[in-house]
Amino acid sequence: MFGSALNVSDFGSDFLASLAMNVLGSESTPGSNNFIEPAFSSGLPIYYLQTKCTDTEKSGLSFPSLPAADNEIKCDQALNLWRNSSSEINSELYKGYQRGNSDGQVNEIVSAFDFLNSNGNGYNVCIWYNSTYERHTGFGPSSVLLRIPRSINLLSNSYLQFLLGPGTKMLFEFVKEMPKPETSFNLELSSLLGTMFFTWVILQLFPVVLTSLVYEKQQKLRIMMKMHGLGDGPYWMISYGYFLAISVIYMLCFVIFGSLLGLKIFTINDYSIQFVFYFIYINLQIALAFMVASIFSNVKTATVTAYIGVFGTGLLAVFLFQFFVQNTSFPRGWIIVMEFYPGFALYRGLYELAQFSFQGSSSGSGGMKWQNLSESTNGMKEVLIIMFVEWIVMLFAAFYVDQVLLSGSRKSPLFYLKGFQKRPPFQKLDAQMQGSKVFSQTEKPDVIQEKEKVEQLLLEPSINHTIVCDDVKKVYPGRDGNPDKYAVRGLFLFVPQGECFGMLGPNGAGKTSFINMMIGLTKPTSGRAFVQGLDIRTQMDEIYTTMGVCPQHDLLWESLTGREHLLFYGRLKNLKGSLLTQAVEESLMSLNLFHGGVADKQVGKYSGGMKRRLSVAISLIGDPRVIYMDEPSSGLDPASRKSLWNVVKRAKQNRAIILTSILSLFCRFDFEARYSARCPLFRYTRLVFVSW
């Protein structure tokens, strides 16, 4: 059946003719589709089949038109086997391939032949080969070229030589394709290489959103806006809408530019499918950023982590997730589980779009349509469902985590159940609580009088006293065996409308800790405090709507101007139109921030004193009923301090103002006179003296 020993000299004159007359093999790894034979340039031995091998030819063989690579030629004995049924032939041919048997072994079978009714007058033969052979490429299974003409030559020549003698031969060099219109080979790189690249491009939005959210958290701008009346609901709606608008514009530019460049992944696939896919994903990505932002408190850490996640997702998707998707033996259920990670869901959707565009551009059948989503091999439908459900769940989960973990306004994990309970503004003290309060004999008479007044107000509440504090304490637990740290020790205080209450004391006396409790940055360890009859422990959201704050450190946006700050916070206080403009102008002029273009200069270019005056202006705008100023005069020159005193003195009408200062005791009497205020003295975390 096989010819004589391989004649190397024949290859020099008619290489293809001699090659077609022999069955060759090699240990080299075949190409992706077997169109190119790498064996001839590999330098590895080339084997040719013979019925009986007598010796190994030592001559070298060089393939024409390729770099010289001498191949050793070896004979390999071929066995002719008989099988009794077609089922046996099918089984052995299929199991001869490595992926066709459970052992992963290779049984090299050239072909199987059935001569049927062939005789001296007729030649009728059936050639058996494995037509299921295919290779898995980066875009799914791909057909592989099997050189059947060589088997035809082998069989035809053996039959002719059987009938007519050994000198007879018939040669089929190739099988000609049917005529077709002229075509050109276009390699669609966007489909072959674009999936990972496009994944990275879309994921670049995630660090942008995350960094913005963490920046507001780190700089305490979020809590600053909340203290001036911006509720959590409006904040989420505004922030979410802003990020969604940016993401939509980004994705529109992404698709438009890709379409203008003629990339098939955009132009062939249905644009409506792309819109739905991208829209759902960017919403999921924004919700995920809100969720992750609750974990981080530092912008640099969040940024580095986000970009590691972006590039790590792309690499894992290409080298791990895609392998599982293409492996038909891998359970589909685990693929769905992996797609619950948003990055893998994005990659799977882009993978399906790329696969359809590649097949459509090569076959002219078009890309993905809505009807293709029902195909069992198309994962786009499951990706859309997973991302949509995950988007909704992630959004509500992020809001819940934000409420429970947000610094300064942390709520109970069951906070959503407390809305059904209503408490009276003031609660009368029971006999046991009253009996537990024993005044120290070492306290000043005016301090004791302040405590008695607070207890009387709690028993007979009056709306004229805007701020009432009842035994408020702040204690930080000790660490590493150290005792507990008392920041505020049992403060009793009341401030009526129209009064400016100045708190003097050295650093560490507890002034800022008290202010932080009153404005919601920290929660009191024990005790109660009421603002306009509202409990700071449970009703801070309502208190924020009537409050103005000048914090100890300026919490401002460096990129906004002073005027823009006041316009923003004025709108939070429900000022509109001419009233808003007038309030902003008056605030800027009263604090010397109007003239010389200062109002329209970015805050990042302000001096320390200018930033401090702007913080005071923010606390006063919108006519709040309660104002807290933590060391408002720090960093101000004498002229600016005098201007500030005048502003505060005018602002105390129909308001309750609490401000702190580290002024010395010598300056205390001047402080009282200028502000017309009570001016207590703080020392060692407790109130030691109250002035009238």
Image (spheres, grey):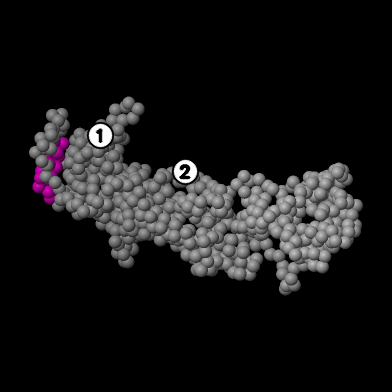
Q: Is residue 319 left or right of residue 392?
A: right
Side of 524 where 200 appears, left or right: right
Q: Which amino acid does the dot numbered 2 rest on?
A: Thr
Q: Residue at x 73, y 60 (%)?
A: 114
Query: Residue at 68% across / 47% down in the picture?
Result: 106
- Is residue 455 on the magenta stretch? yes
- Which residue is outermost to the top? 481
- In the image, residue 479 above or below residue 549: above
Residue 85 as seen in the image, left or right of residue 24: left
Mark 2, residue position:
301
Query: Image quarter for residue 297?
Result: top left
Q: How many marks?
A: 2
Q: Kindly tell me whether residue 485 is visible in this rendering.
A: yes
Image x and y of residue 107, in percent: 69, 48
Whether label 2 touches label 1, CB < 8 Å: no
Residue ID for mark 1? 685
Query: What percent of the width, then of the height, locates residue 70?
Result: 84, 46
Amino acid type, residue under disc 1 in the picture? Thr
Q: Give the position of the N terminus as an image quadrant.
A: bottom right
Which comes before the other along the chain, label 2 or label 1?
A: 2
The residue located at (27%, 48%) in the rendering is 414
Residue 638 disc label: none
Which element carries disc 1, helix, strand or loop? Answer: loop
**Magenta span:** 446-462
On the image, the x and y values in percent for residue 365 come to 61, 69
